[in-house]
Image (cartoon, rainbow, N blue to C red):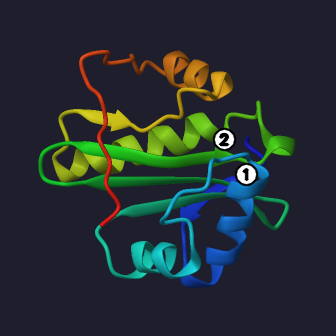
């Protein structure tokens, strides 16, 4: 039996999720703020899942299907709760949800300079697609 549960993120969880991302060493992005995360939770089609243990939020993942493919963002686990299967459980659950929406391919945005993250994604069966380069503009 696991010592954590997975659940949907709620509006009242937003500040705790932002705190988790900071503690998990996620590189801050332009959308890492309460308003944008709350919008993802309440207004978008994105799936924002959390792992909860001992009454606190210890993991997160965002999955979104754009009608073409599934995308995974912001998979993070609190350092004190790593190596317990939380990340694998979050990925598995969001993959199931994306597949139910019609996703036939799922991509994960992973920071290249975080070897712990890149090795995790390889361990769960994701391969680096060297053909793709991500271009970004913040309008």
Q: Residue at x 59, y 18 (%)?
A: 119
Above-or-below relation of 123 to 67: above
**Which residue is label 2 attached to?**
86
Which quadrant is home to the N terminus? Answer: top right
First in sequence: mark 1 or mark 2? Answer: 1
- Is residue 58 shown to the viewer in this render? no
Separation of residues labelled 1 and 2 (CA atoms):
8 Å
Where does residue 46 sit, x and y in percent of width and height? 35, 63
Look at the numbered disc 1 and give the secondary structure of its residue: loop
Mark 2 nearby-residue class (10 Å; few <14, some 14–19, many ≥20): many
Which quadrant is home to the C terminus? Answer: bottom left
Using the image, tell me which numbered label, if any, was put on residue 4.
1
Does 123 sit left or right of 86 as displayed?
Answer: left
Mark 1 nearby-residue class (10 Å; few <14, some 14–19, many ≥20): many
Q: Residue at x 18, y 35 (%)?
A: 104
Report which quarter residue 82 is drawn in. top right
Does 83 sit left or right of 124 as displayed?
Answer: right
Above-or-below relation of 83 to 44: above
Using the image, tell me which numbered label, if any, was put on residue 37.
none
Say which of marks 1 and 2 sits in front. Answer: 2
Report which quarter residue 6 is drawn in. bottom right
Where does residue 115 sit, x and y in percent of width and height? 65, 21
Look at the numbered disc 2 and give the secondary structure of its residue: helix
Q: Residue at x 43, y 18 (%)?
A: 125
Does 61 sit left or right of 18 as displayed?
Answer: left
Q: In front: 99, or 114?
A: 114
Q: Residue at x 45, y 48 (%)?
A: 73
Where does residue 5 sit, x and y in percent of width and height? 66, 55
CB atoms of marks 1 and 2 within 8 Å: yes
- Is residue 138 shown to the viewer in this render? yes
Q: In front: 61, or 21?
A: 21
């Amino acid at each position: 039996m696991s010592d954590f549960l997975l659940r949907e993120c709620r509006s009242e969880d937003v500040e705790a999720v932002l705190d988790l991302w900071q503690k998990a060493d996620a590189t801050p992005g332009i959308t890492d703020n309460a308003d944008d995360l709350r919008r993802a939770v309440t207004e978008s089609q994105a799936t924002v899942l959390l792992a909860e243990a001992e009454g606190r939020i210890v993991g997160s993942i965002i999955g979104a299907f754009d009608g073409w493919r599934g995308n995974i963002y912001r998979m993070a686990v609190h350092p004190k709760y790593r190596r317990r299967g939380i990340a694998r459980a979050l990925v598995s659950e969001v993959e199931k949800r994306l597949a139910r929406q019609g996703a036939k391919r799922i991509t994960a945005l992973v920071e290249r300079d975080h070897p712990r993250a890149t090795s995790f994604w390889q361990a769960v069966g994701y391969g680096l697609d060297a053909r793709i380069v991500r271009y970004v503009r913040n309008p």
